[in-house]
Image (cartoon, helix red, strand yellow):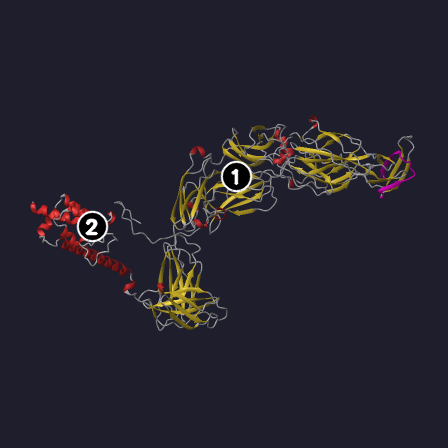
Amino acid sequence: MQQVNIVGSSPMSAPSRLIQTLQAAPDTHPSNLSLVSATQTSLCFSWKPLPESEYNSSPETVGYRLRVWRTDGDGEDRTEDVKGGVRTTDTTIEGLCPWTHYQVQIQAFNSIGPGLWSQTVAARTTESAPSGSPANLNAEAVSSSRIMLTWSSLPETQRNGVIIGYKVLYQENDSDGPPGVRVIEGDRNLTLLLGSLQKYTMYALQVLAYTRIGDGPPSSPVLLRTKEDVPGPPVRMMFPEVRLTSVRVVWQPPAFPNGIILGYQISYRLHSRDALRWTTVEVGSNARQFTVTGLSSEHTYVFRLTARTAVGWGEQQEALVVTTERRERAQPPRKLSVPQDEVEARRLRLYWVTGGSGSSPLRYFSLQLKELPSGPWKTHTADIPHNLTSWTVDRLKPFTSYKLRMLATNDVGDSVLSKETEAVTTLQDVPNEPPVILSVKPTTTTSVMVQWKRPTEDSINGVLTGYRLYYRELPANTSTGSDSGVHTTKNHTTSAFITTKSTFKTVSSASLTEFELTQLKKFKHYQIVMTSYNIIGESPPSVPVEVSVGEAAPSVAPQSIKVSAVSPSGLEVTWDMPPLETQNGLIQGYKIHYWERDNQNQTEKVKVIFVPDTHVHLTNLTSYTPYMVTLTAFNTAGDGPPSDPRGARTLQSAPSQPSYLSFSEVMGGSVNVSWGAPLTPNGQVEGYRVIYQPTAPIQGVSKVVTVDVKGSWQRWLKVQDLIKGATYMFGVQALTVSYGPPIQANITAQPVKGSPGSPVEMSITKTSSALTIHWSEGDIGAAPVTGYVVEARPSDEGVWHSFIRLLPPGSRSVSVPLERLRSGVSYEFRVIAINRYGYGHPSTPSVALAALSERPFYEEWWFLLVMALVGLILILVLVFTLLLHGHSTKYKACSTGKHITPGEESVTLDNGGFTSLELNSRTINTKNSFLKKNGTRSPPRPSPGGLHYSDEDICNNYNGAVLTESTTLTEKPTEVSESEVSVSSCLSLRMSFKMTKTN
């Protein structure tokens, strides 16, 4: 507050505490209540929502209520609460009576109470087919083929529209075929003389009323039989036994008895005598054969057979018979032909030439036909009179190919089948059925889109050319509102009347199933029917459909749609309005269809948003799930086309608990914990957390152990630090962006009841390459042993590990290669038996055994390499030693008799002269000659001269001596060669020394 005086206003005071007024009922009602559309049993209304200032309560408690009652006062008032809350702007009231005037009001209400009722709005449902049938149906047979029918008009409450006329349905009682229909125009014509009926036949008679929309239900059937008349001729008259003086005639009752058969009359005479001299015999109604005797042999007789009812004798059946015993089967008909000019759509004319009768007159022909390409042969007609040579074959299908054949029958039996005709194709006919109109929707303010279903193939009767759409403007007082639904009650009589007074459009393509009718008048009501046509003509018209033109659903979906995730359970959707020229009226709001991408049928939902909002927050969605969203704009005429689906995935959240938790390999100190992936992961599972603790303190201590398992693939954990006999509580949580709720279970760390006892007589033997573990079977428990497990405990770890898994139940030992053990580590082993109850008690641990010790150095790989290198070095040293020793010996042998100084020797060796080259080229031979001692020289080859060789002799004798002495030798050339080489070598050496010294 503030104070004011002549000087001015004071500052505002401090605000008071928050004060809220009490709630109250709404002060006013929604405005602009108007009829949107009407059908036969419903009315759709719209209104302007209540302003927020008029709620007088929280928005969640505000709603709307409609009151509806019949103008004529019949029935009770109805009130309906509108679903959808305070922002709803339309609703449909169902379950009303067709063609009835109603009054409607609306009010707003909240948690305190209702507001005022609005002004009354009048509306009327549209016309429908009658809901009742004519009463007091009476029938009277006036002759053997006519019945007079009378009935009463429909009550006003059952008419549901303007009665155009009546239809009388009639058919033979117990017949499976469709009934015959007679149409009576006008609602005041209440009698019909029904003619052309079968004689003495029981008929079921019904009558119904119809409007322009369709037929009402038929009345209860009235059964009535036409009057009796004279019968038709007996059928199947034959003579199975013929003798020279007697015959036996057999027959069947007339196909059309036209009453109760009281007896038969058989008349016969010689074929060549007076036509008036007949012998007549009467038999009872149950007789089916008669034997005539006293006939003349080898003569032809004429027989007549007649049936009688209370009205009199009927038509006669006549046949010839020859009294002879030489009878044969008849020959089949010949030269079957079908002239093309006598082929129609549903019938054709067949011609043939009769074959021989074989001394036994023909009785009848049978006709068979086959529908091409693969139909079976069927008997079409079995009693064609024997005296005919052509027959009209009816009951055929239009535009279908057939083949035909025949056989003849006489008293002996059936003939063989005739030759088939050439394939003959019936002509096309008008289609039997129209297309079925599925929907008629306004597309603009002056056009509608008609969609239909193609007629069935069997009803086309040829090649379908196209369709015709007939439409006409209805008078203003014919119907109120809009009815774009498709009526299922057929009324071809009314539709045929519509086509004669309508404009039509031709669709010249049989493959199309929709067509847009344009240039219609705004705010007019139209009626539409369709026909299909081929080159022959049009089908009957379809069921009429009505539609209002002037307001159309939007023709374009909302624009610039964006879908984004805002939380694990929410999506934000934004969009722009359709372009103004495509709105076709005032946009009322939008429908948002959304569903899980992979499960549309079960999860699709719709949310309605009203203008001016162009965004929505979709809530209560599943976490980390892809969703698809489409939008449609709507106005009073209906929904526009849906937008293309847009997708987004909700954010991750904590997962649900793992699907299961189980324990296996339960022993005194360890257990294998397994769990399942969460049913709703709500994201990418990154790992699991296992928490376990004893349910009661152990020695005053309660230790809680937490183990994090990384990755989503591993869903098990081997826990080995349990105390035997203690009960532990295990819990497992899955991790995405955070940990979800745990799944928990308790387990006692000891073998379960019924599991095996400990294996006994545990022992181990060791060889150079393996350990062998031996044991004996202990207590098997409550079930047979299914296998064994060997565990090991290394000295450097102190924890038992599974070493060998699931040995066969018959195993009593197992070998372990020493390579599996770590060097320098000792191991203890124990054996556990398993049965279907689980793991049993372990055996007593074995003594600790060391793994394989260090190998001797000489078994190491490097030792062989070292030895090889040492050997190679020794061999090289020995070779060089021998070479040096050899050179020293050679020089000593060549210096005998004169001392050669080292200086002179070196000069001689460096001399590159001729003699030096000769010496070098013969080093091997010189070595062999000069280095050998007398005692070690090889014995010489046998020689005739028995010469004595010596290194010293050679050198002394040839030192400065005449060379011609060598010619006295008698040695063979091959034997002298070595001596010659030796002498030459020595001489050359001496000459080399002399030349060096002289220089």
Name the N-terminal-most of marks 2 and 1: 1
Please name the amino acid that badge 1 sits on.
Answer: Leu
How far apart in space, not on screen, are marks 2 and 1 (Cα)?
A: 149 Å
Residue nearest the observer in this picture, 163 or 700: 700
Tell which residue pokes out farthest to the top in this image.
341
On the image, which quarter does residue 262 sit in? top right
**Magenta region includes residue 308:** yes
* Residue 715 picture location, percent across and down: 41, 58
* Residue 260 picture location, percent across and down: 83, 41
Left or right, 483 with respect to 641, comes to right
**Magenta region includes residue 270:** no
Q: Which label belongs to residue 309?
A: none
Tell which residue pokes out farthest to the left in this image.
998
* Residue 547 picture location, percent across and down: 55, 35
On the image, which quarter does residue 851 sit in? bottom left
The residue tagged 2 is 979
Please name the amino acid that badge 2 sits on.
Answer: Ser
Q: Nearer the viewer, mark 2 or mark 1?
A: 2
Left or right, 636 with respect to 291, comes to left
In the rendered image of this protein, does residue 471 appear above or below residue 594?
above
* Residue 390 picture location, percent across and down: 75, 30
Left or right, 61 with respect to 213, comes to left
The residue tagged 1 is 35
On the image, which quarter does residue 484 sit in? top right
Residue nearest the observer in this picture, 784 or 20: 784
Asked if residue 984 shows in the view, the reply is: no
The residues colored magenta run 286-311
